[in-house]
Image (cartoon, helix red, strand yellow):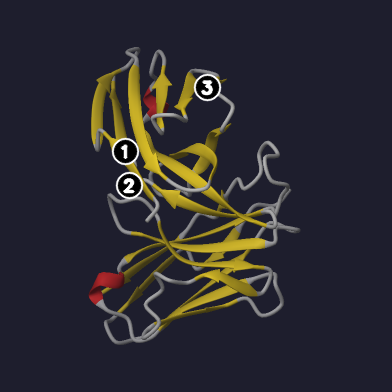
Amino acid sequence: EAGVAQSPRYKIIEKRQSVAFWCNPISGHATLYWYQQILGQGPKLLIQFQNNGVVDDSQLPKDRFSAERLKGVDSTLKIQPAKLEDSAVYLCASSLRGLAGAPNTGELFFGEGSRLTVL
Amino acid sequence: KNQVEQSPQSLIILEGKNCTLQCNYTVSPFSNLRWYKQDTGRGPVSLTIMTFSENTKSNGRYTATLDADTKQSSLHITASQLSDSASYICVVSAGVGGGSYIPTFGRGTSLIVHP
């Protein structure tokens, strides 16, 4: 079974430039997440999709970040314009929408991440 | 507000020794708790999952415990190996109905195993 695919793995840009990250979740996984992980910290949720609808985007800086999952499969996260503090690893994860209480329900499968450096 | 607190922030041990990582949470309504291992430069990978009725679960040299009354979990690593060097993240999920879950992440414990 193919895992979560992300690209690019690494990106270096200057502040005020824009960048886009792409994620293809595991086939059949209805839920897709984007996380921001700053060095030395745990992942911070940016946005959670259920199919092509948004479940939670309360921590997404909407003045500069946007994300879409138009067909309920792959997703794109965009940052425009980038700031120095956006330097981080952007992790995409997916999970099955499962039965309440069922074992292994809700396990997140992560991609390798996209490392962004803003100069 | 749902929160997950982990301790210690970092830990250094010698190869072959045991260690225990802690996780305290305030997540409602509680659905399950997972421990993830994140190697440097990689995405996190699930080690164990525990639901409300489970107290202990093992996965090889990893043993997780859950006390739902005190809302605490621990991850015990036995006979540590160099490959155990990683960040260990506690993730507690709230069930929001319809088969959907919202996970809350801890900041992780960075474990370094020295030879």
Determine the CA span between mark 1 and mark 3.
Answer: 18 Å
Q: First in sequence, mark 1 or 2: give its number.
A: 1
What is the crowding at mark 3: few (fewer than 14 residues within 10 Å), some, or many (at least 20)? few
Give x and y (percent) for residue A18: 39, 85
Name the chain letter of the residue that bears numbered label 1.
B
Circle 3 residue: B55
**Marks 2 and 1: in contact by CB < 8 Å?**
yes
Determine the CA span between mark 1 and mark 2.
Answer: 7 Å
The three-letter amino acid code for the residue at tag 2 is Arg
Query: Is label 3 or label 2 in front?
Result: 3
The three-letter amino acid code for the residue at tag 1 is Gln
Give x and y (percent) for residue A77: 50, 75
Residue at image point 32% right, 42% down: B5
What is the crowding at mark 1: few (fewer than 14 residues within 10 Å), some, or many (at least 20)? many
Quadrant in which residue B59 is drawn: top right
Nearer the observer, A60 or B102: B102
The three-letter amino acid code for the residue at tag 3 is Asn
What is the crowding at mark 2: few (fewer than 14 residues within 10 Å), some, or many (at least 20)? many
Circle 2 residue: B107
The circle drawn on residue B6 is: 1
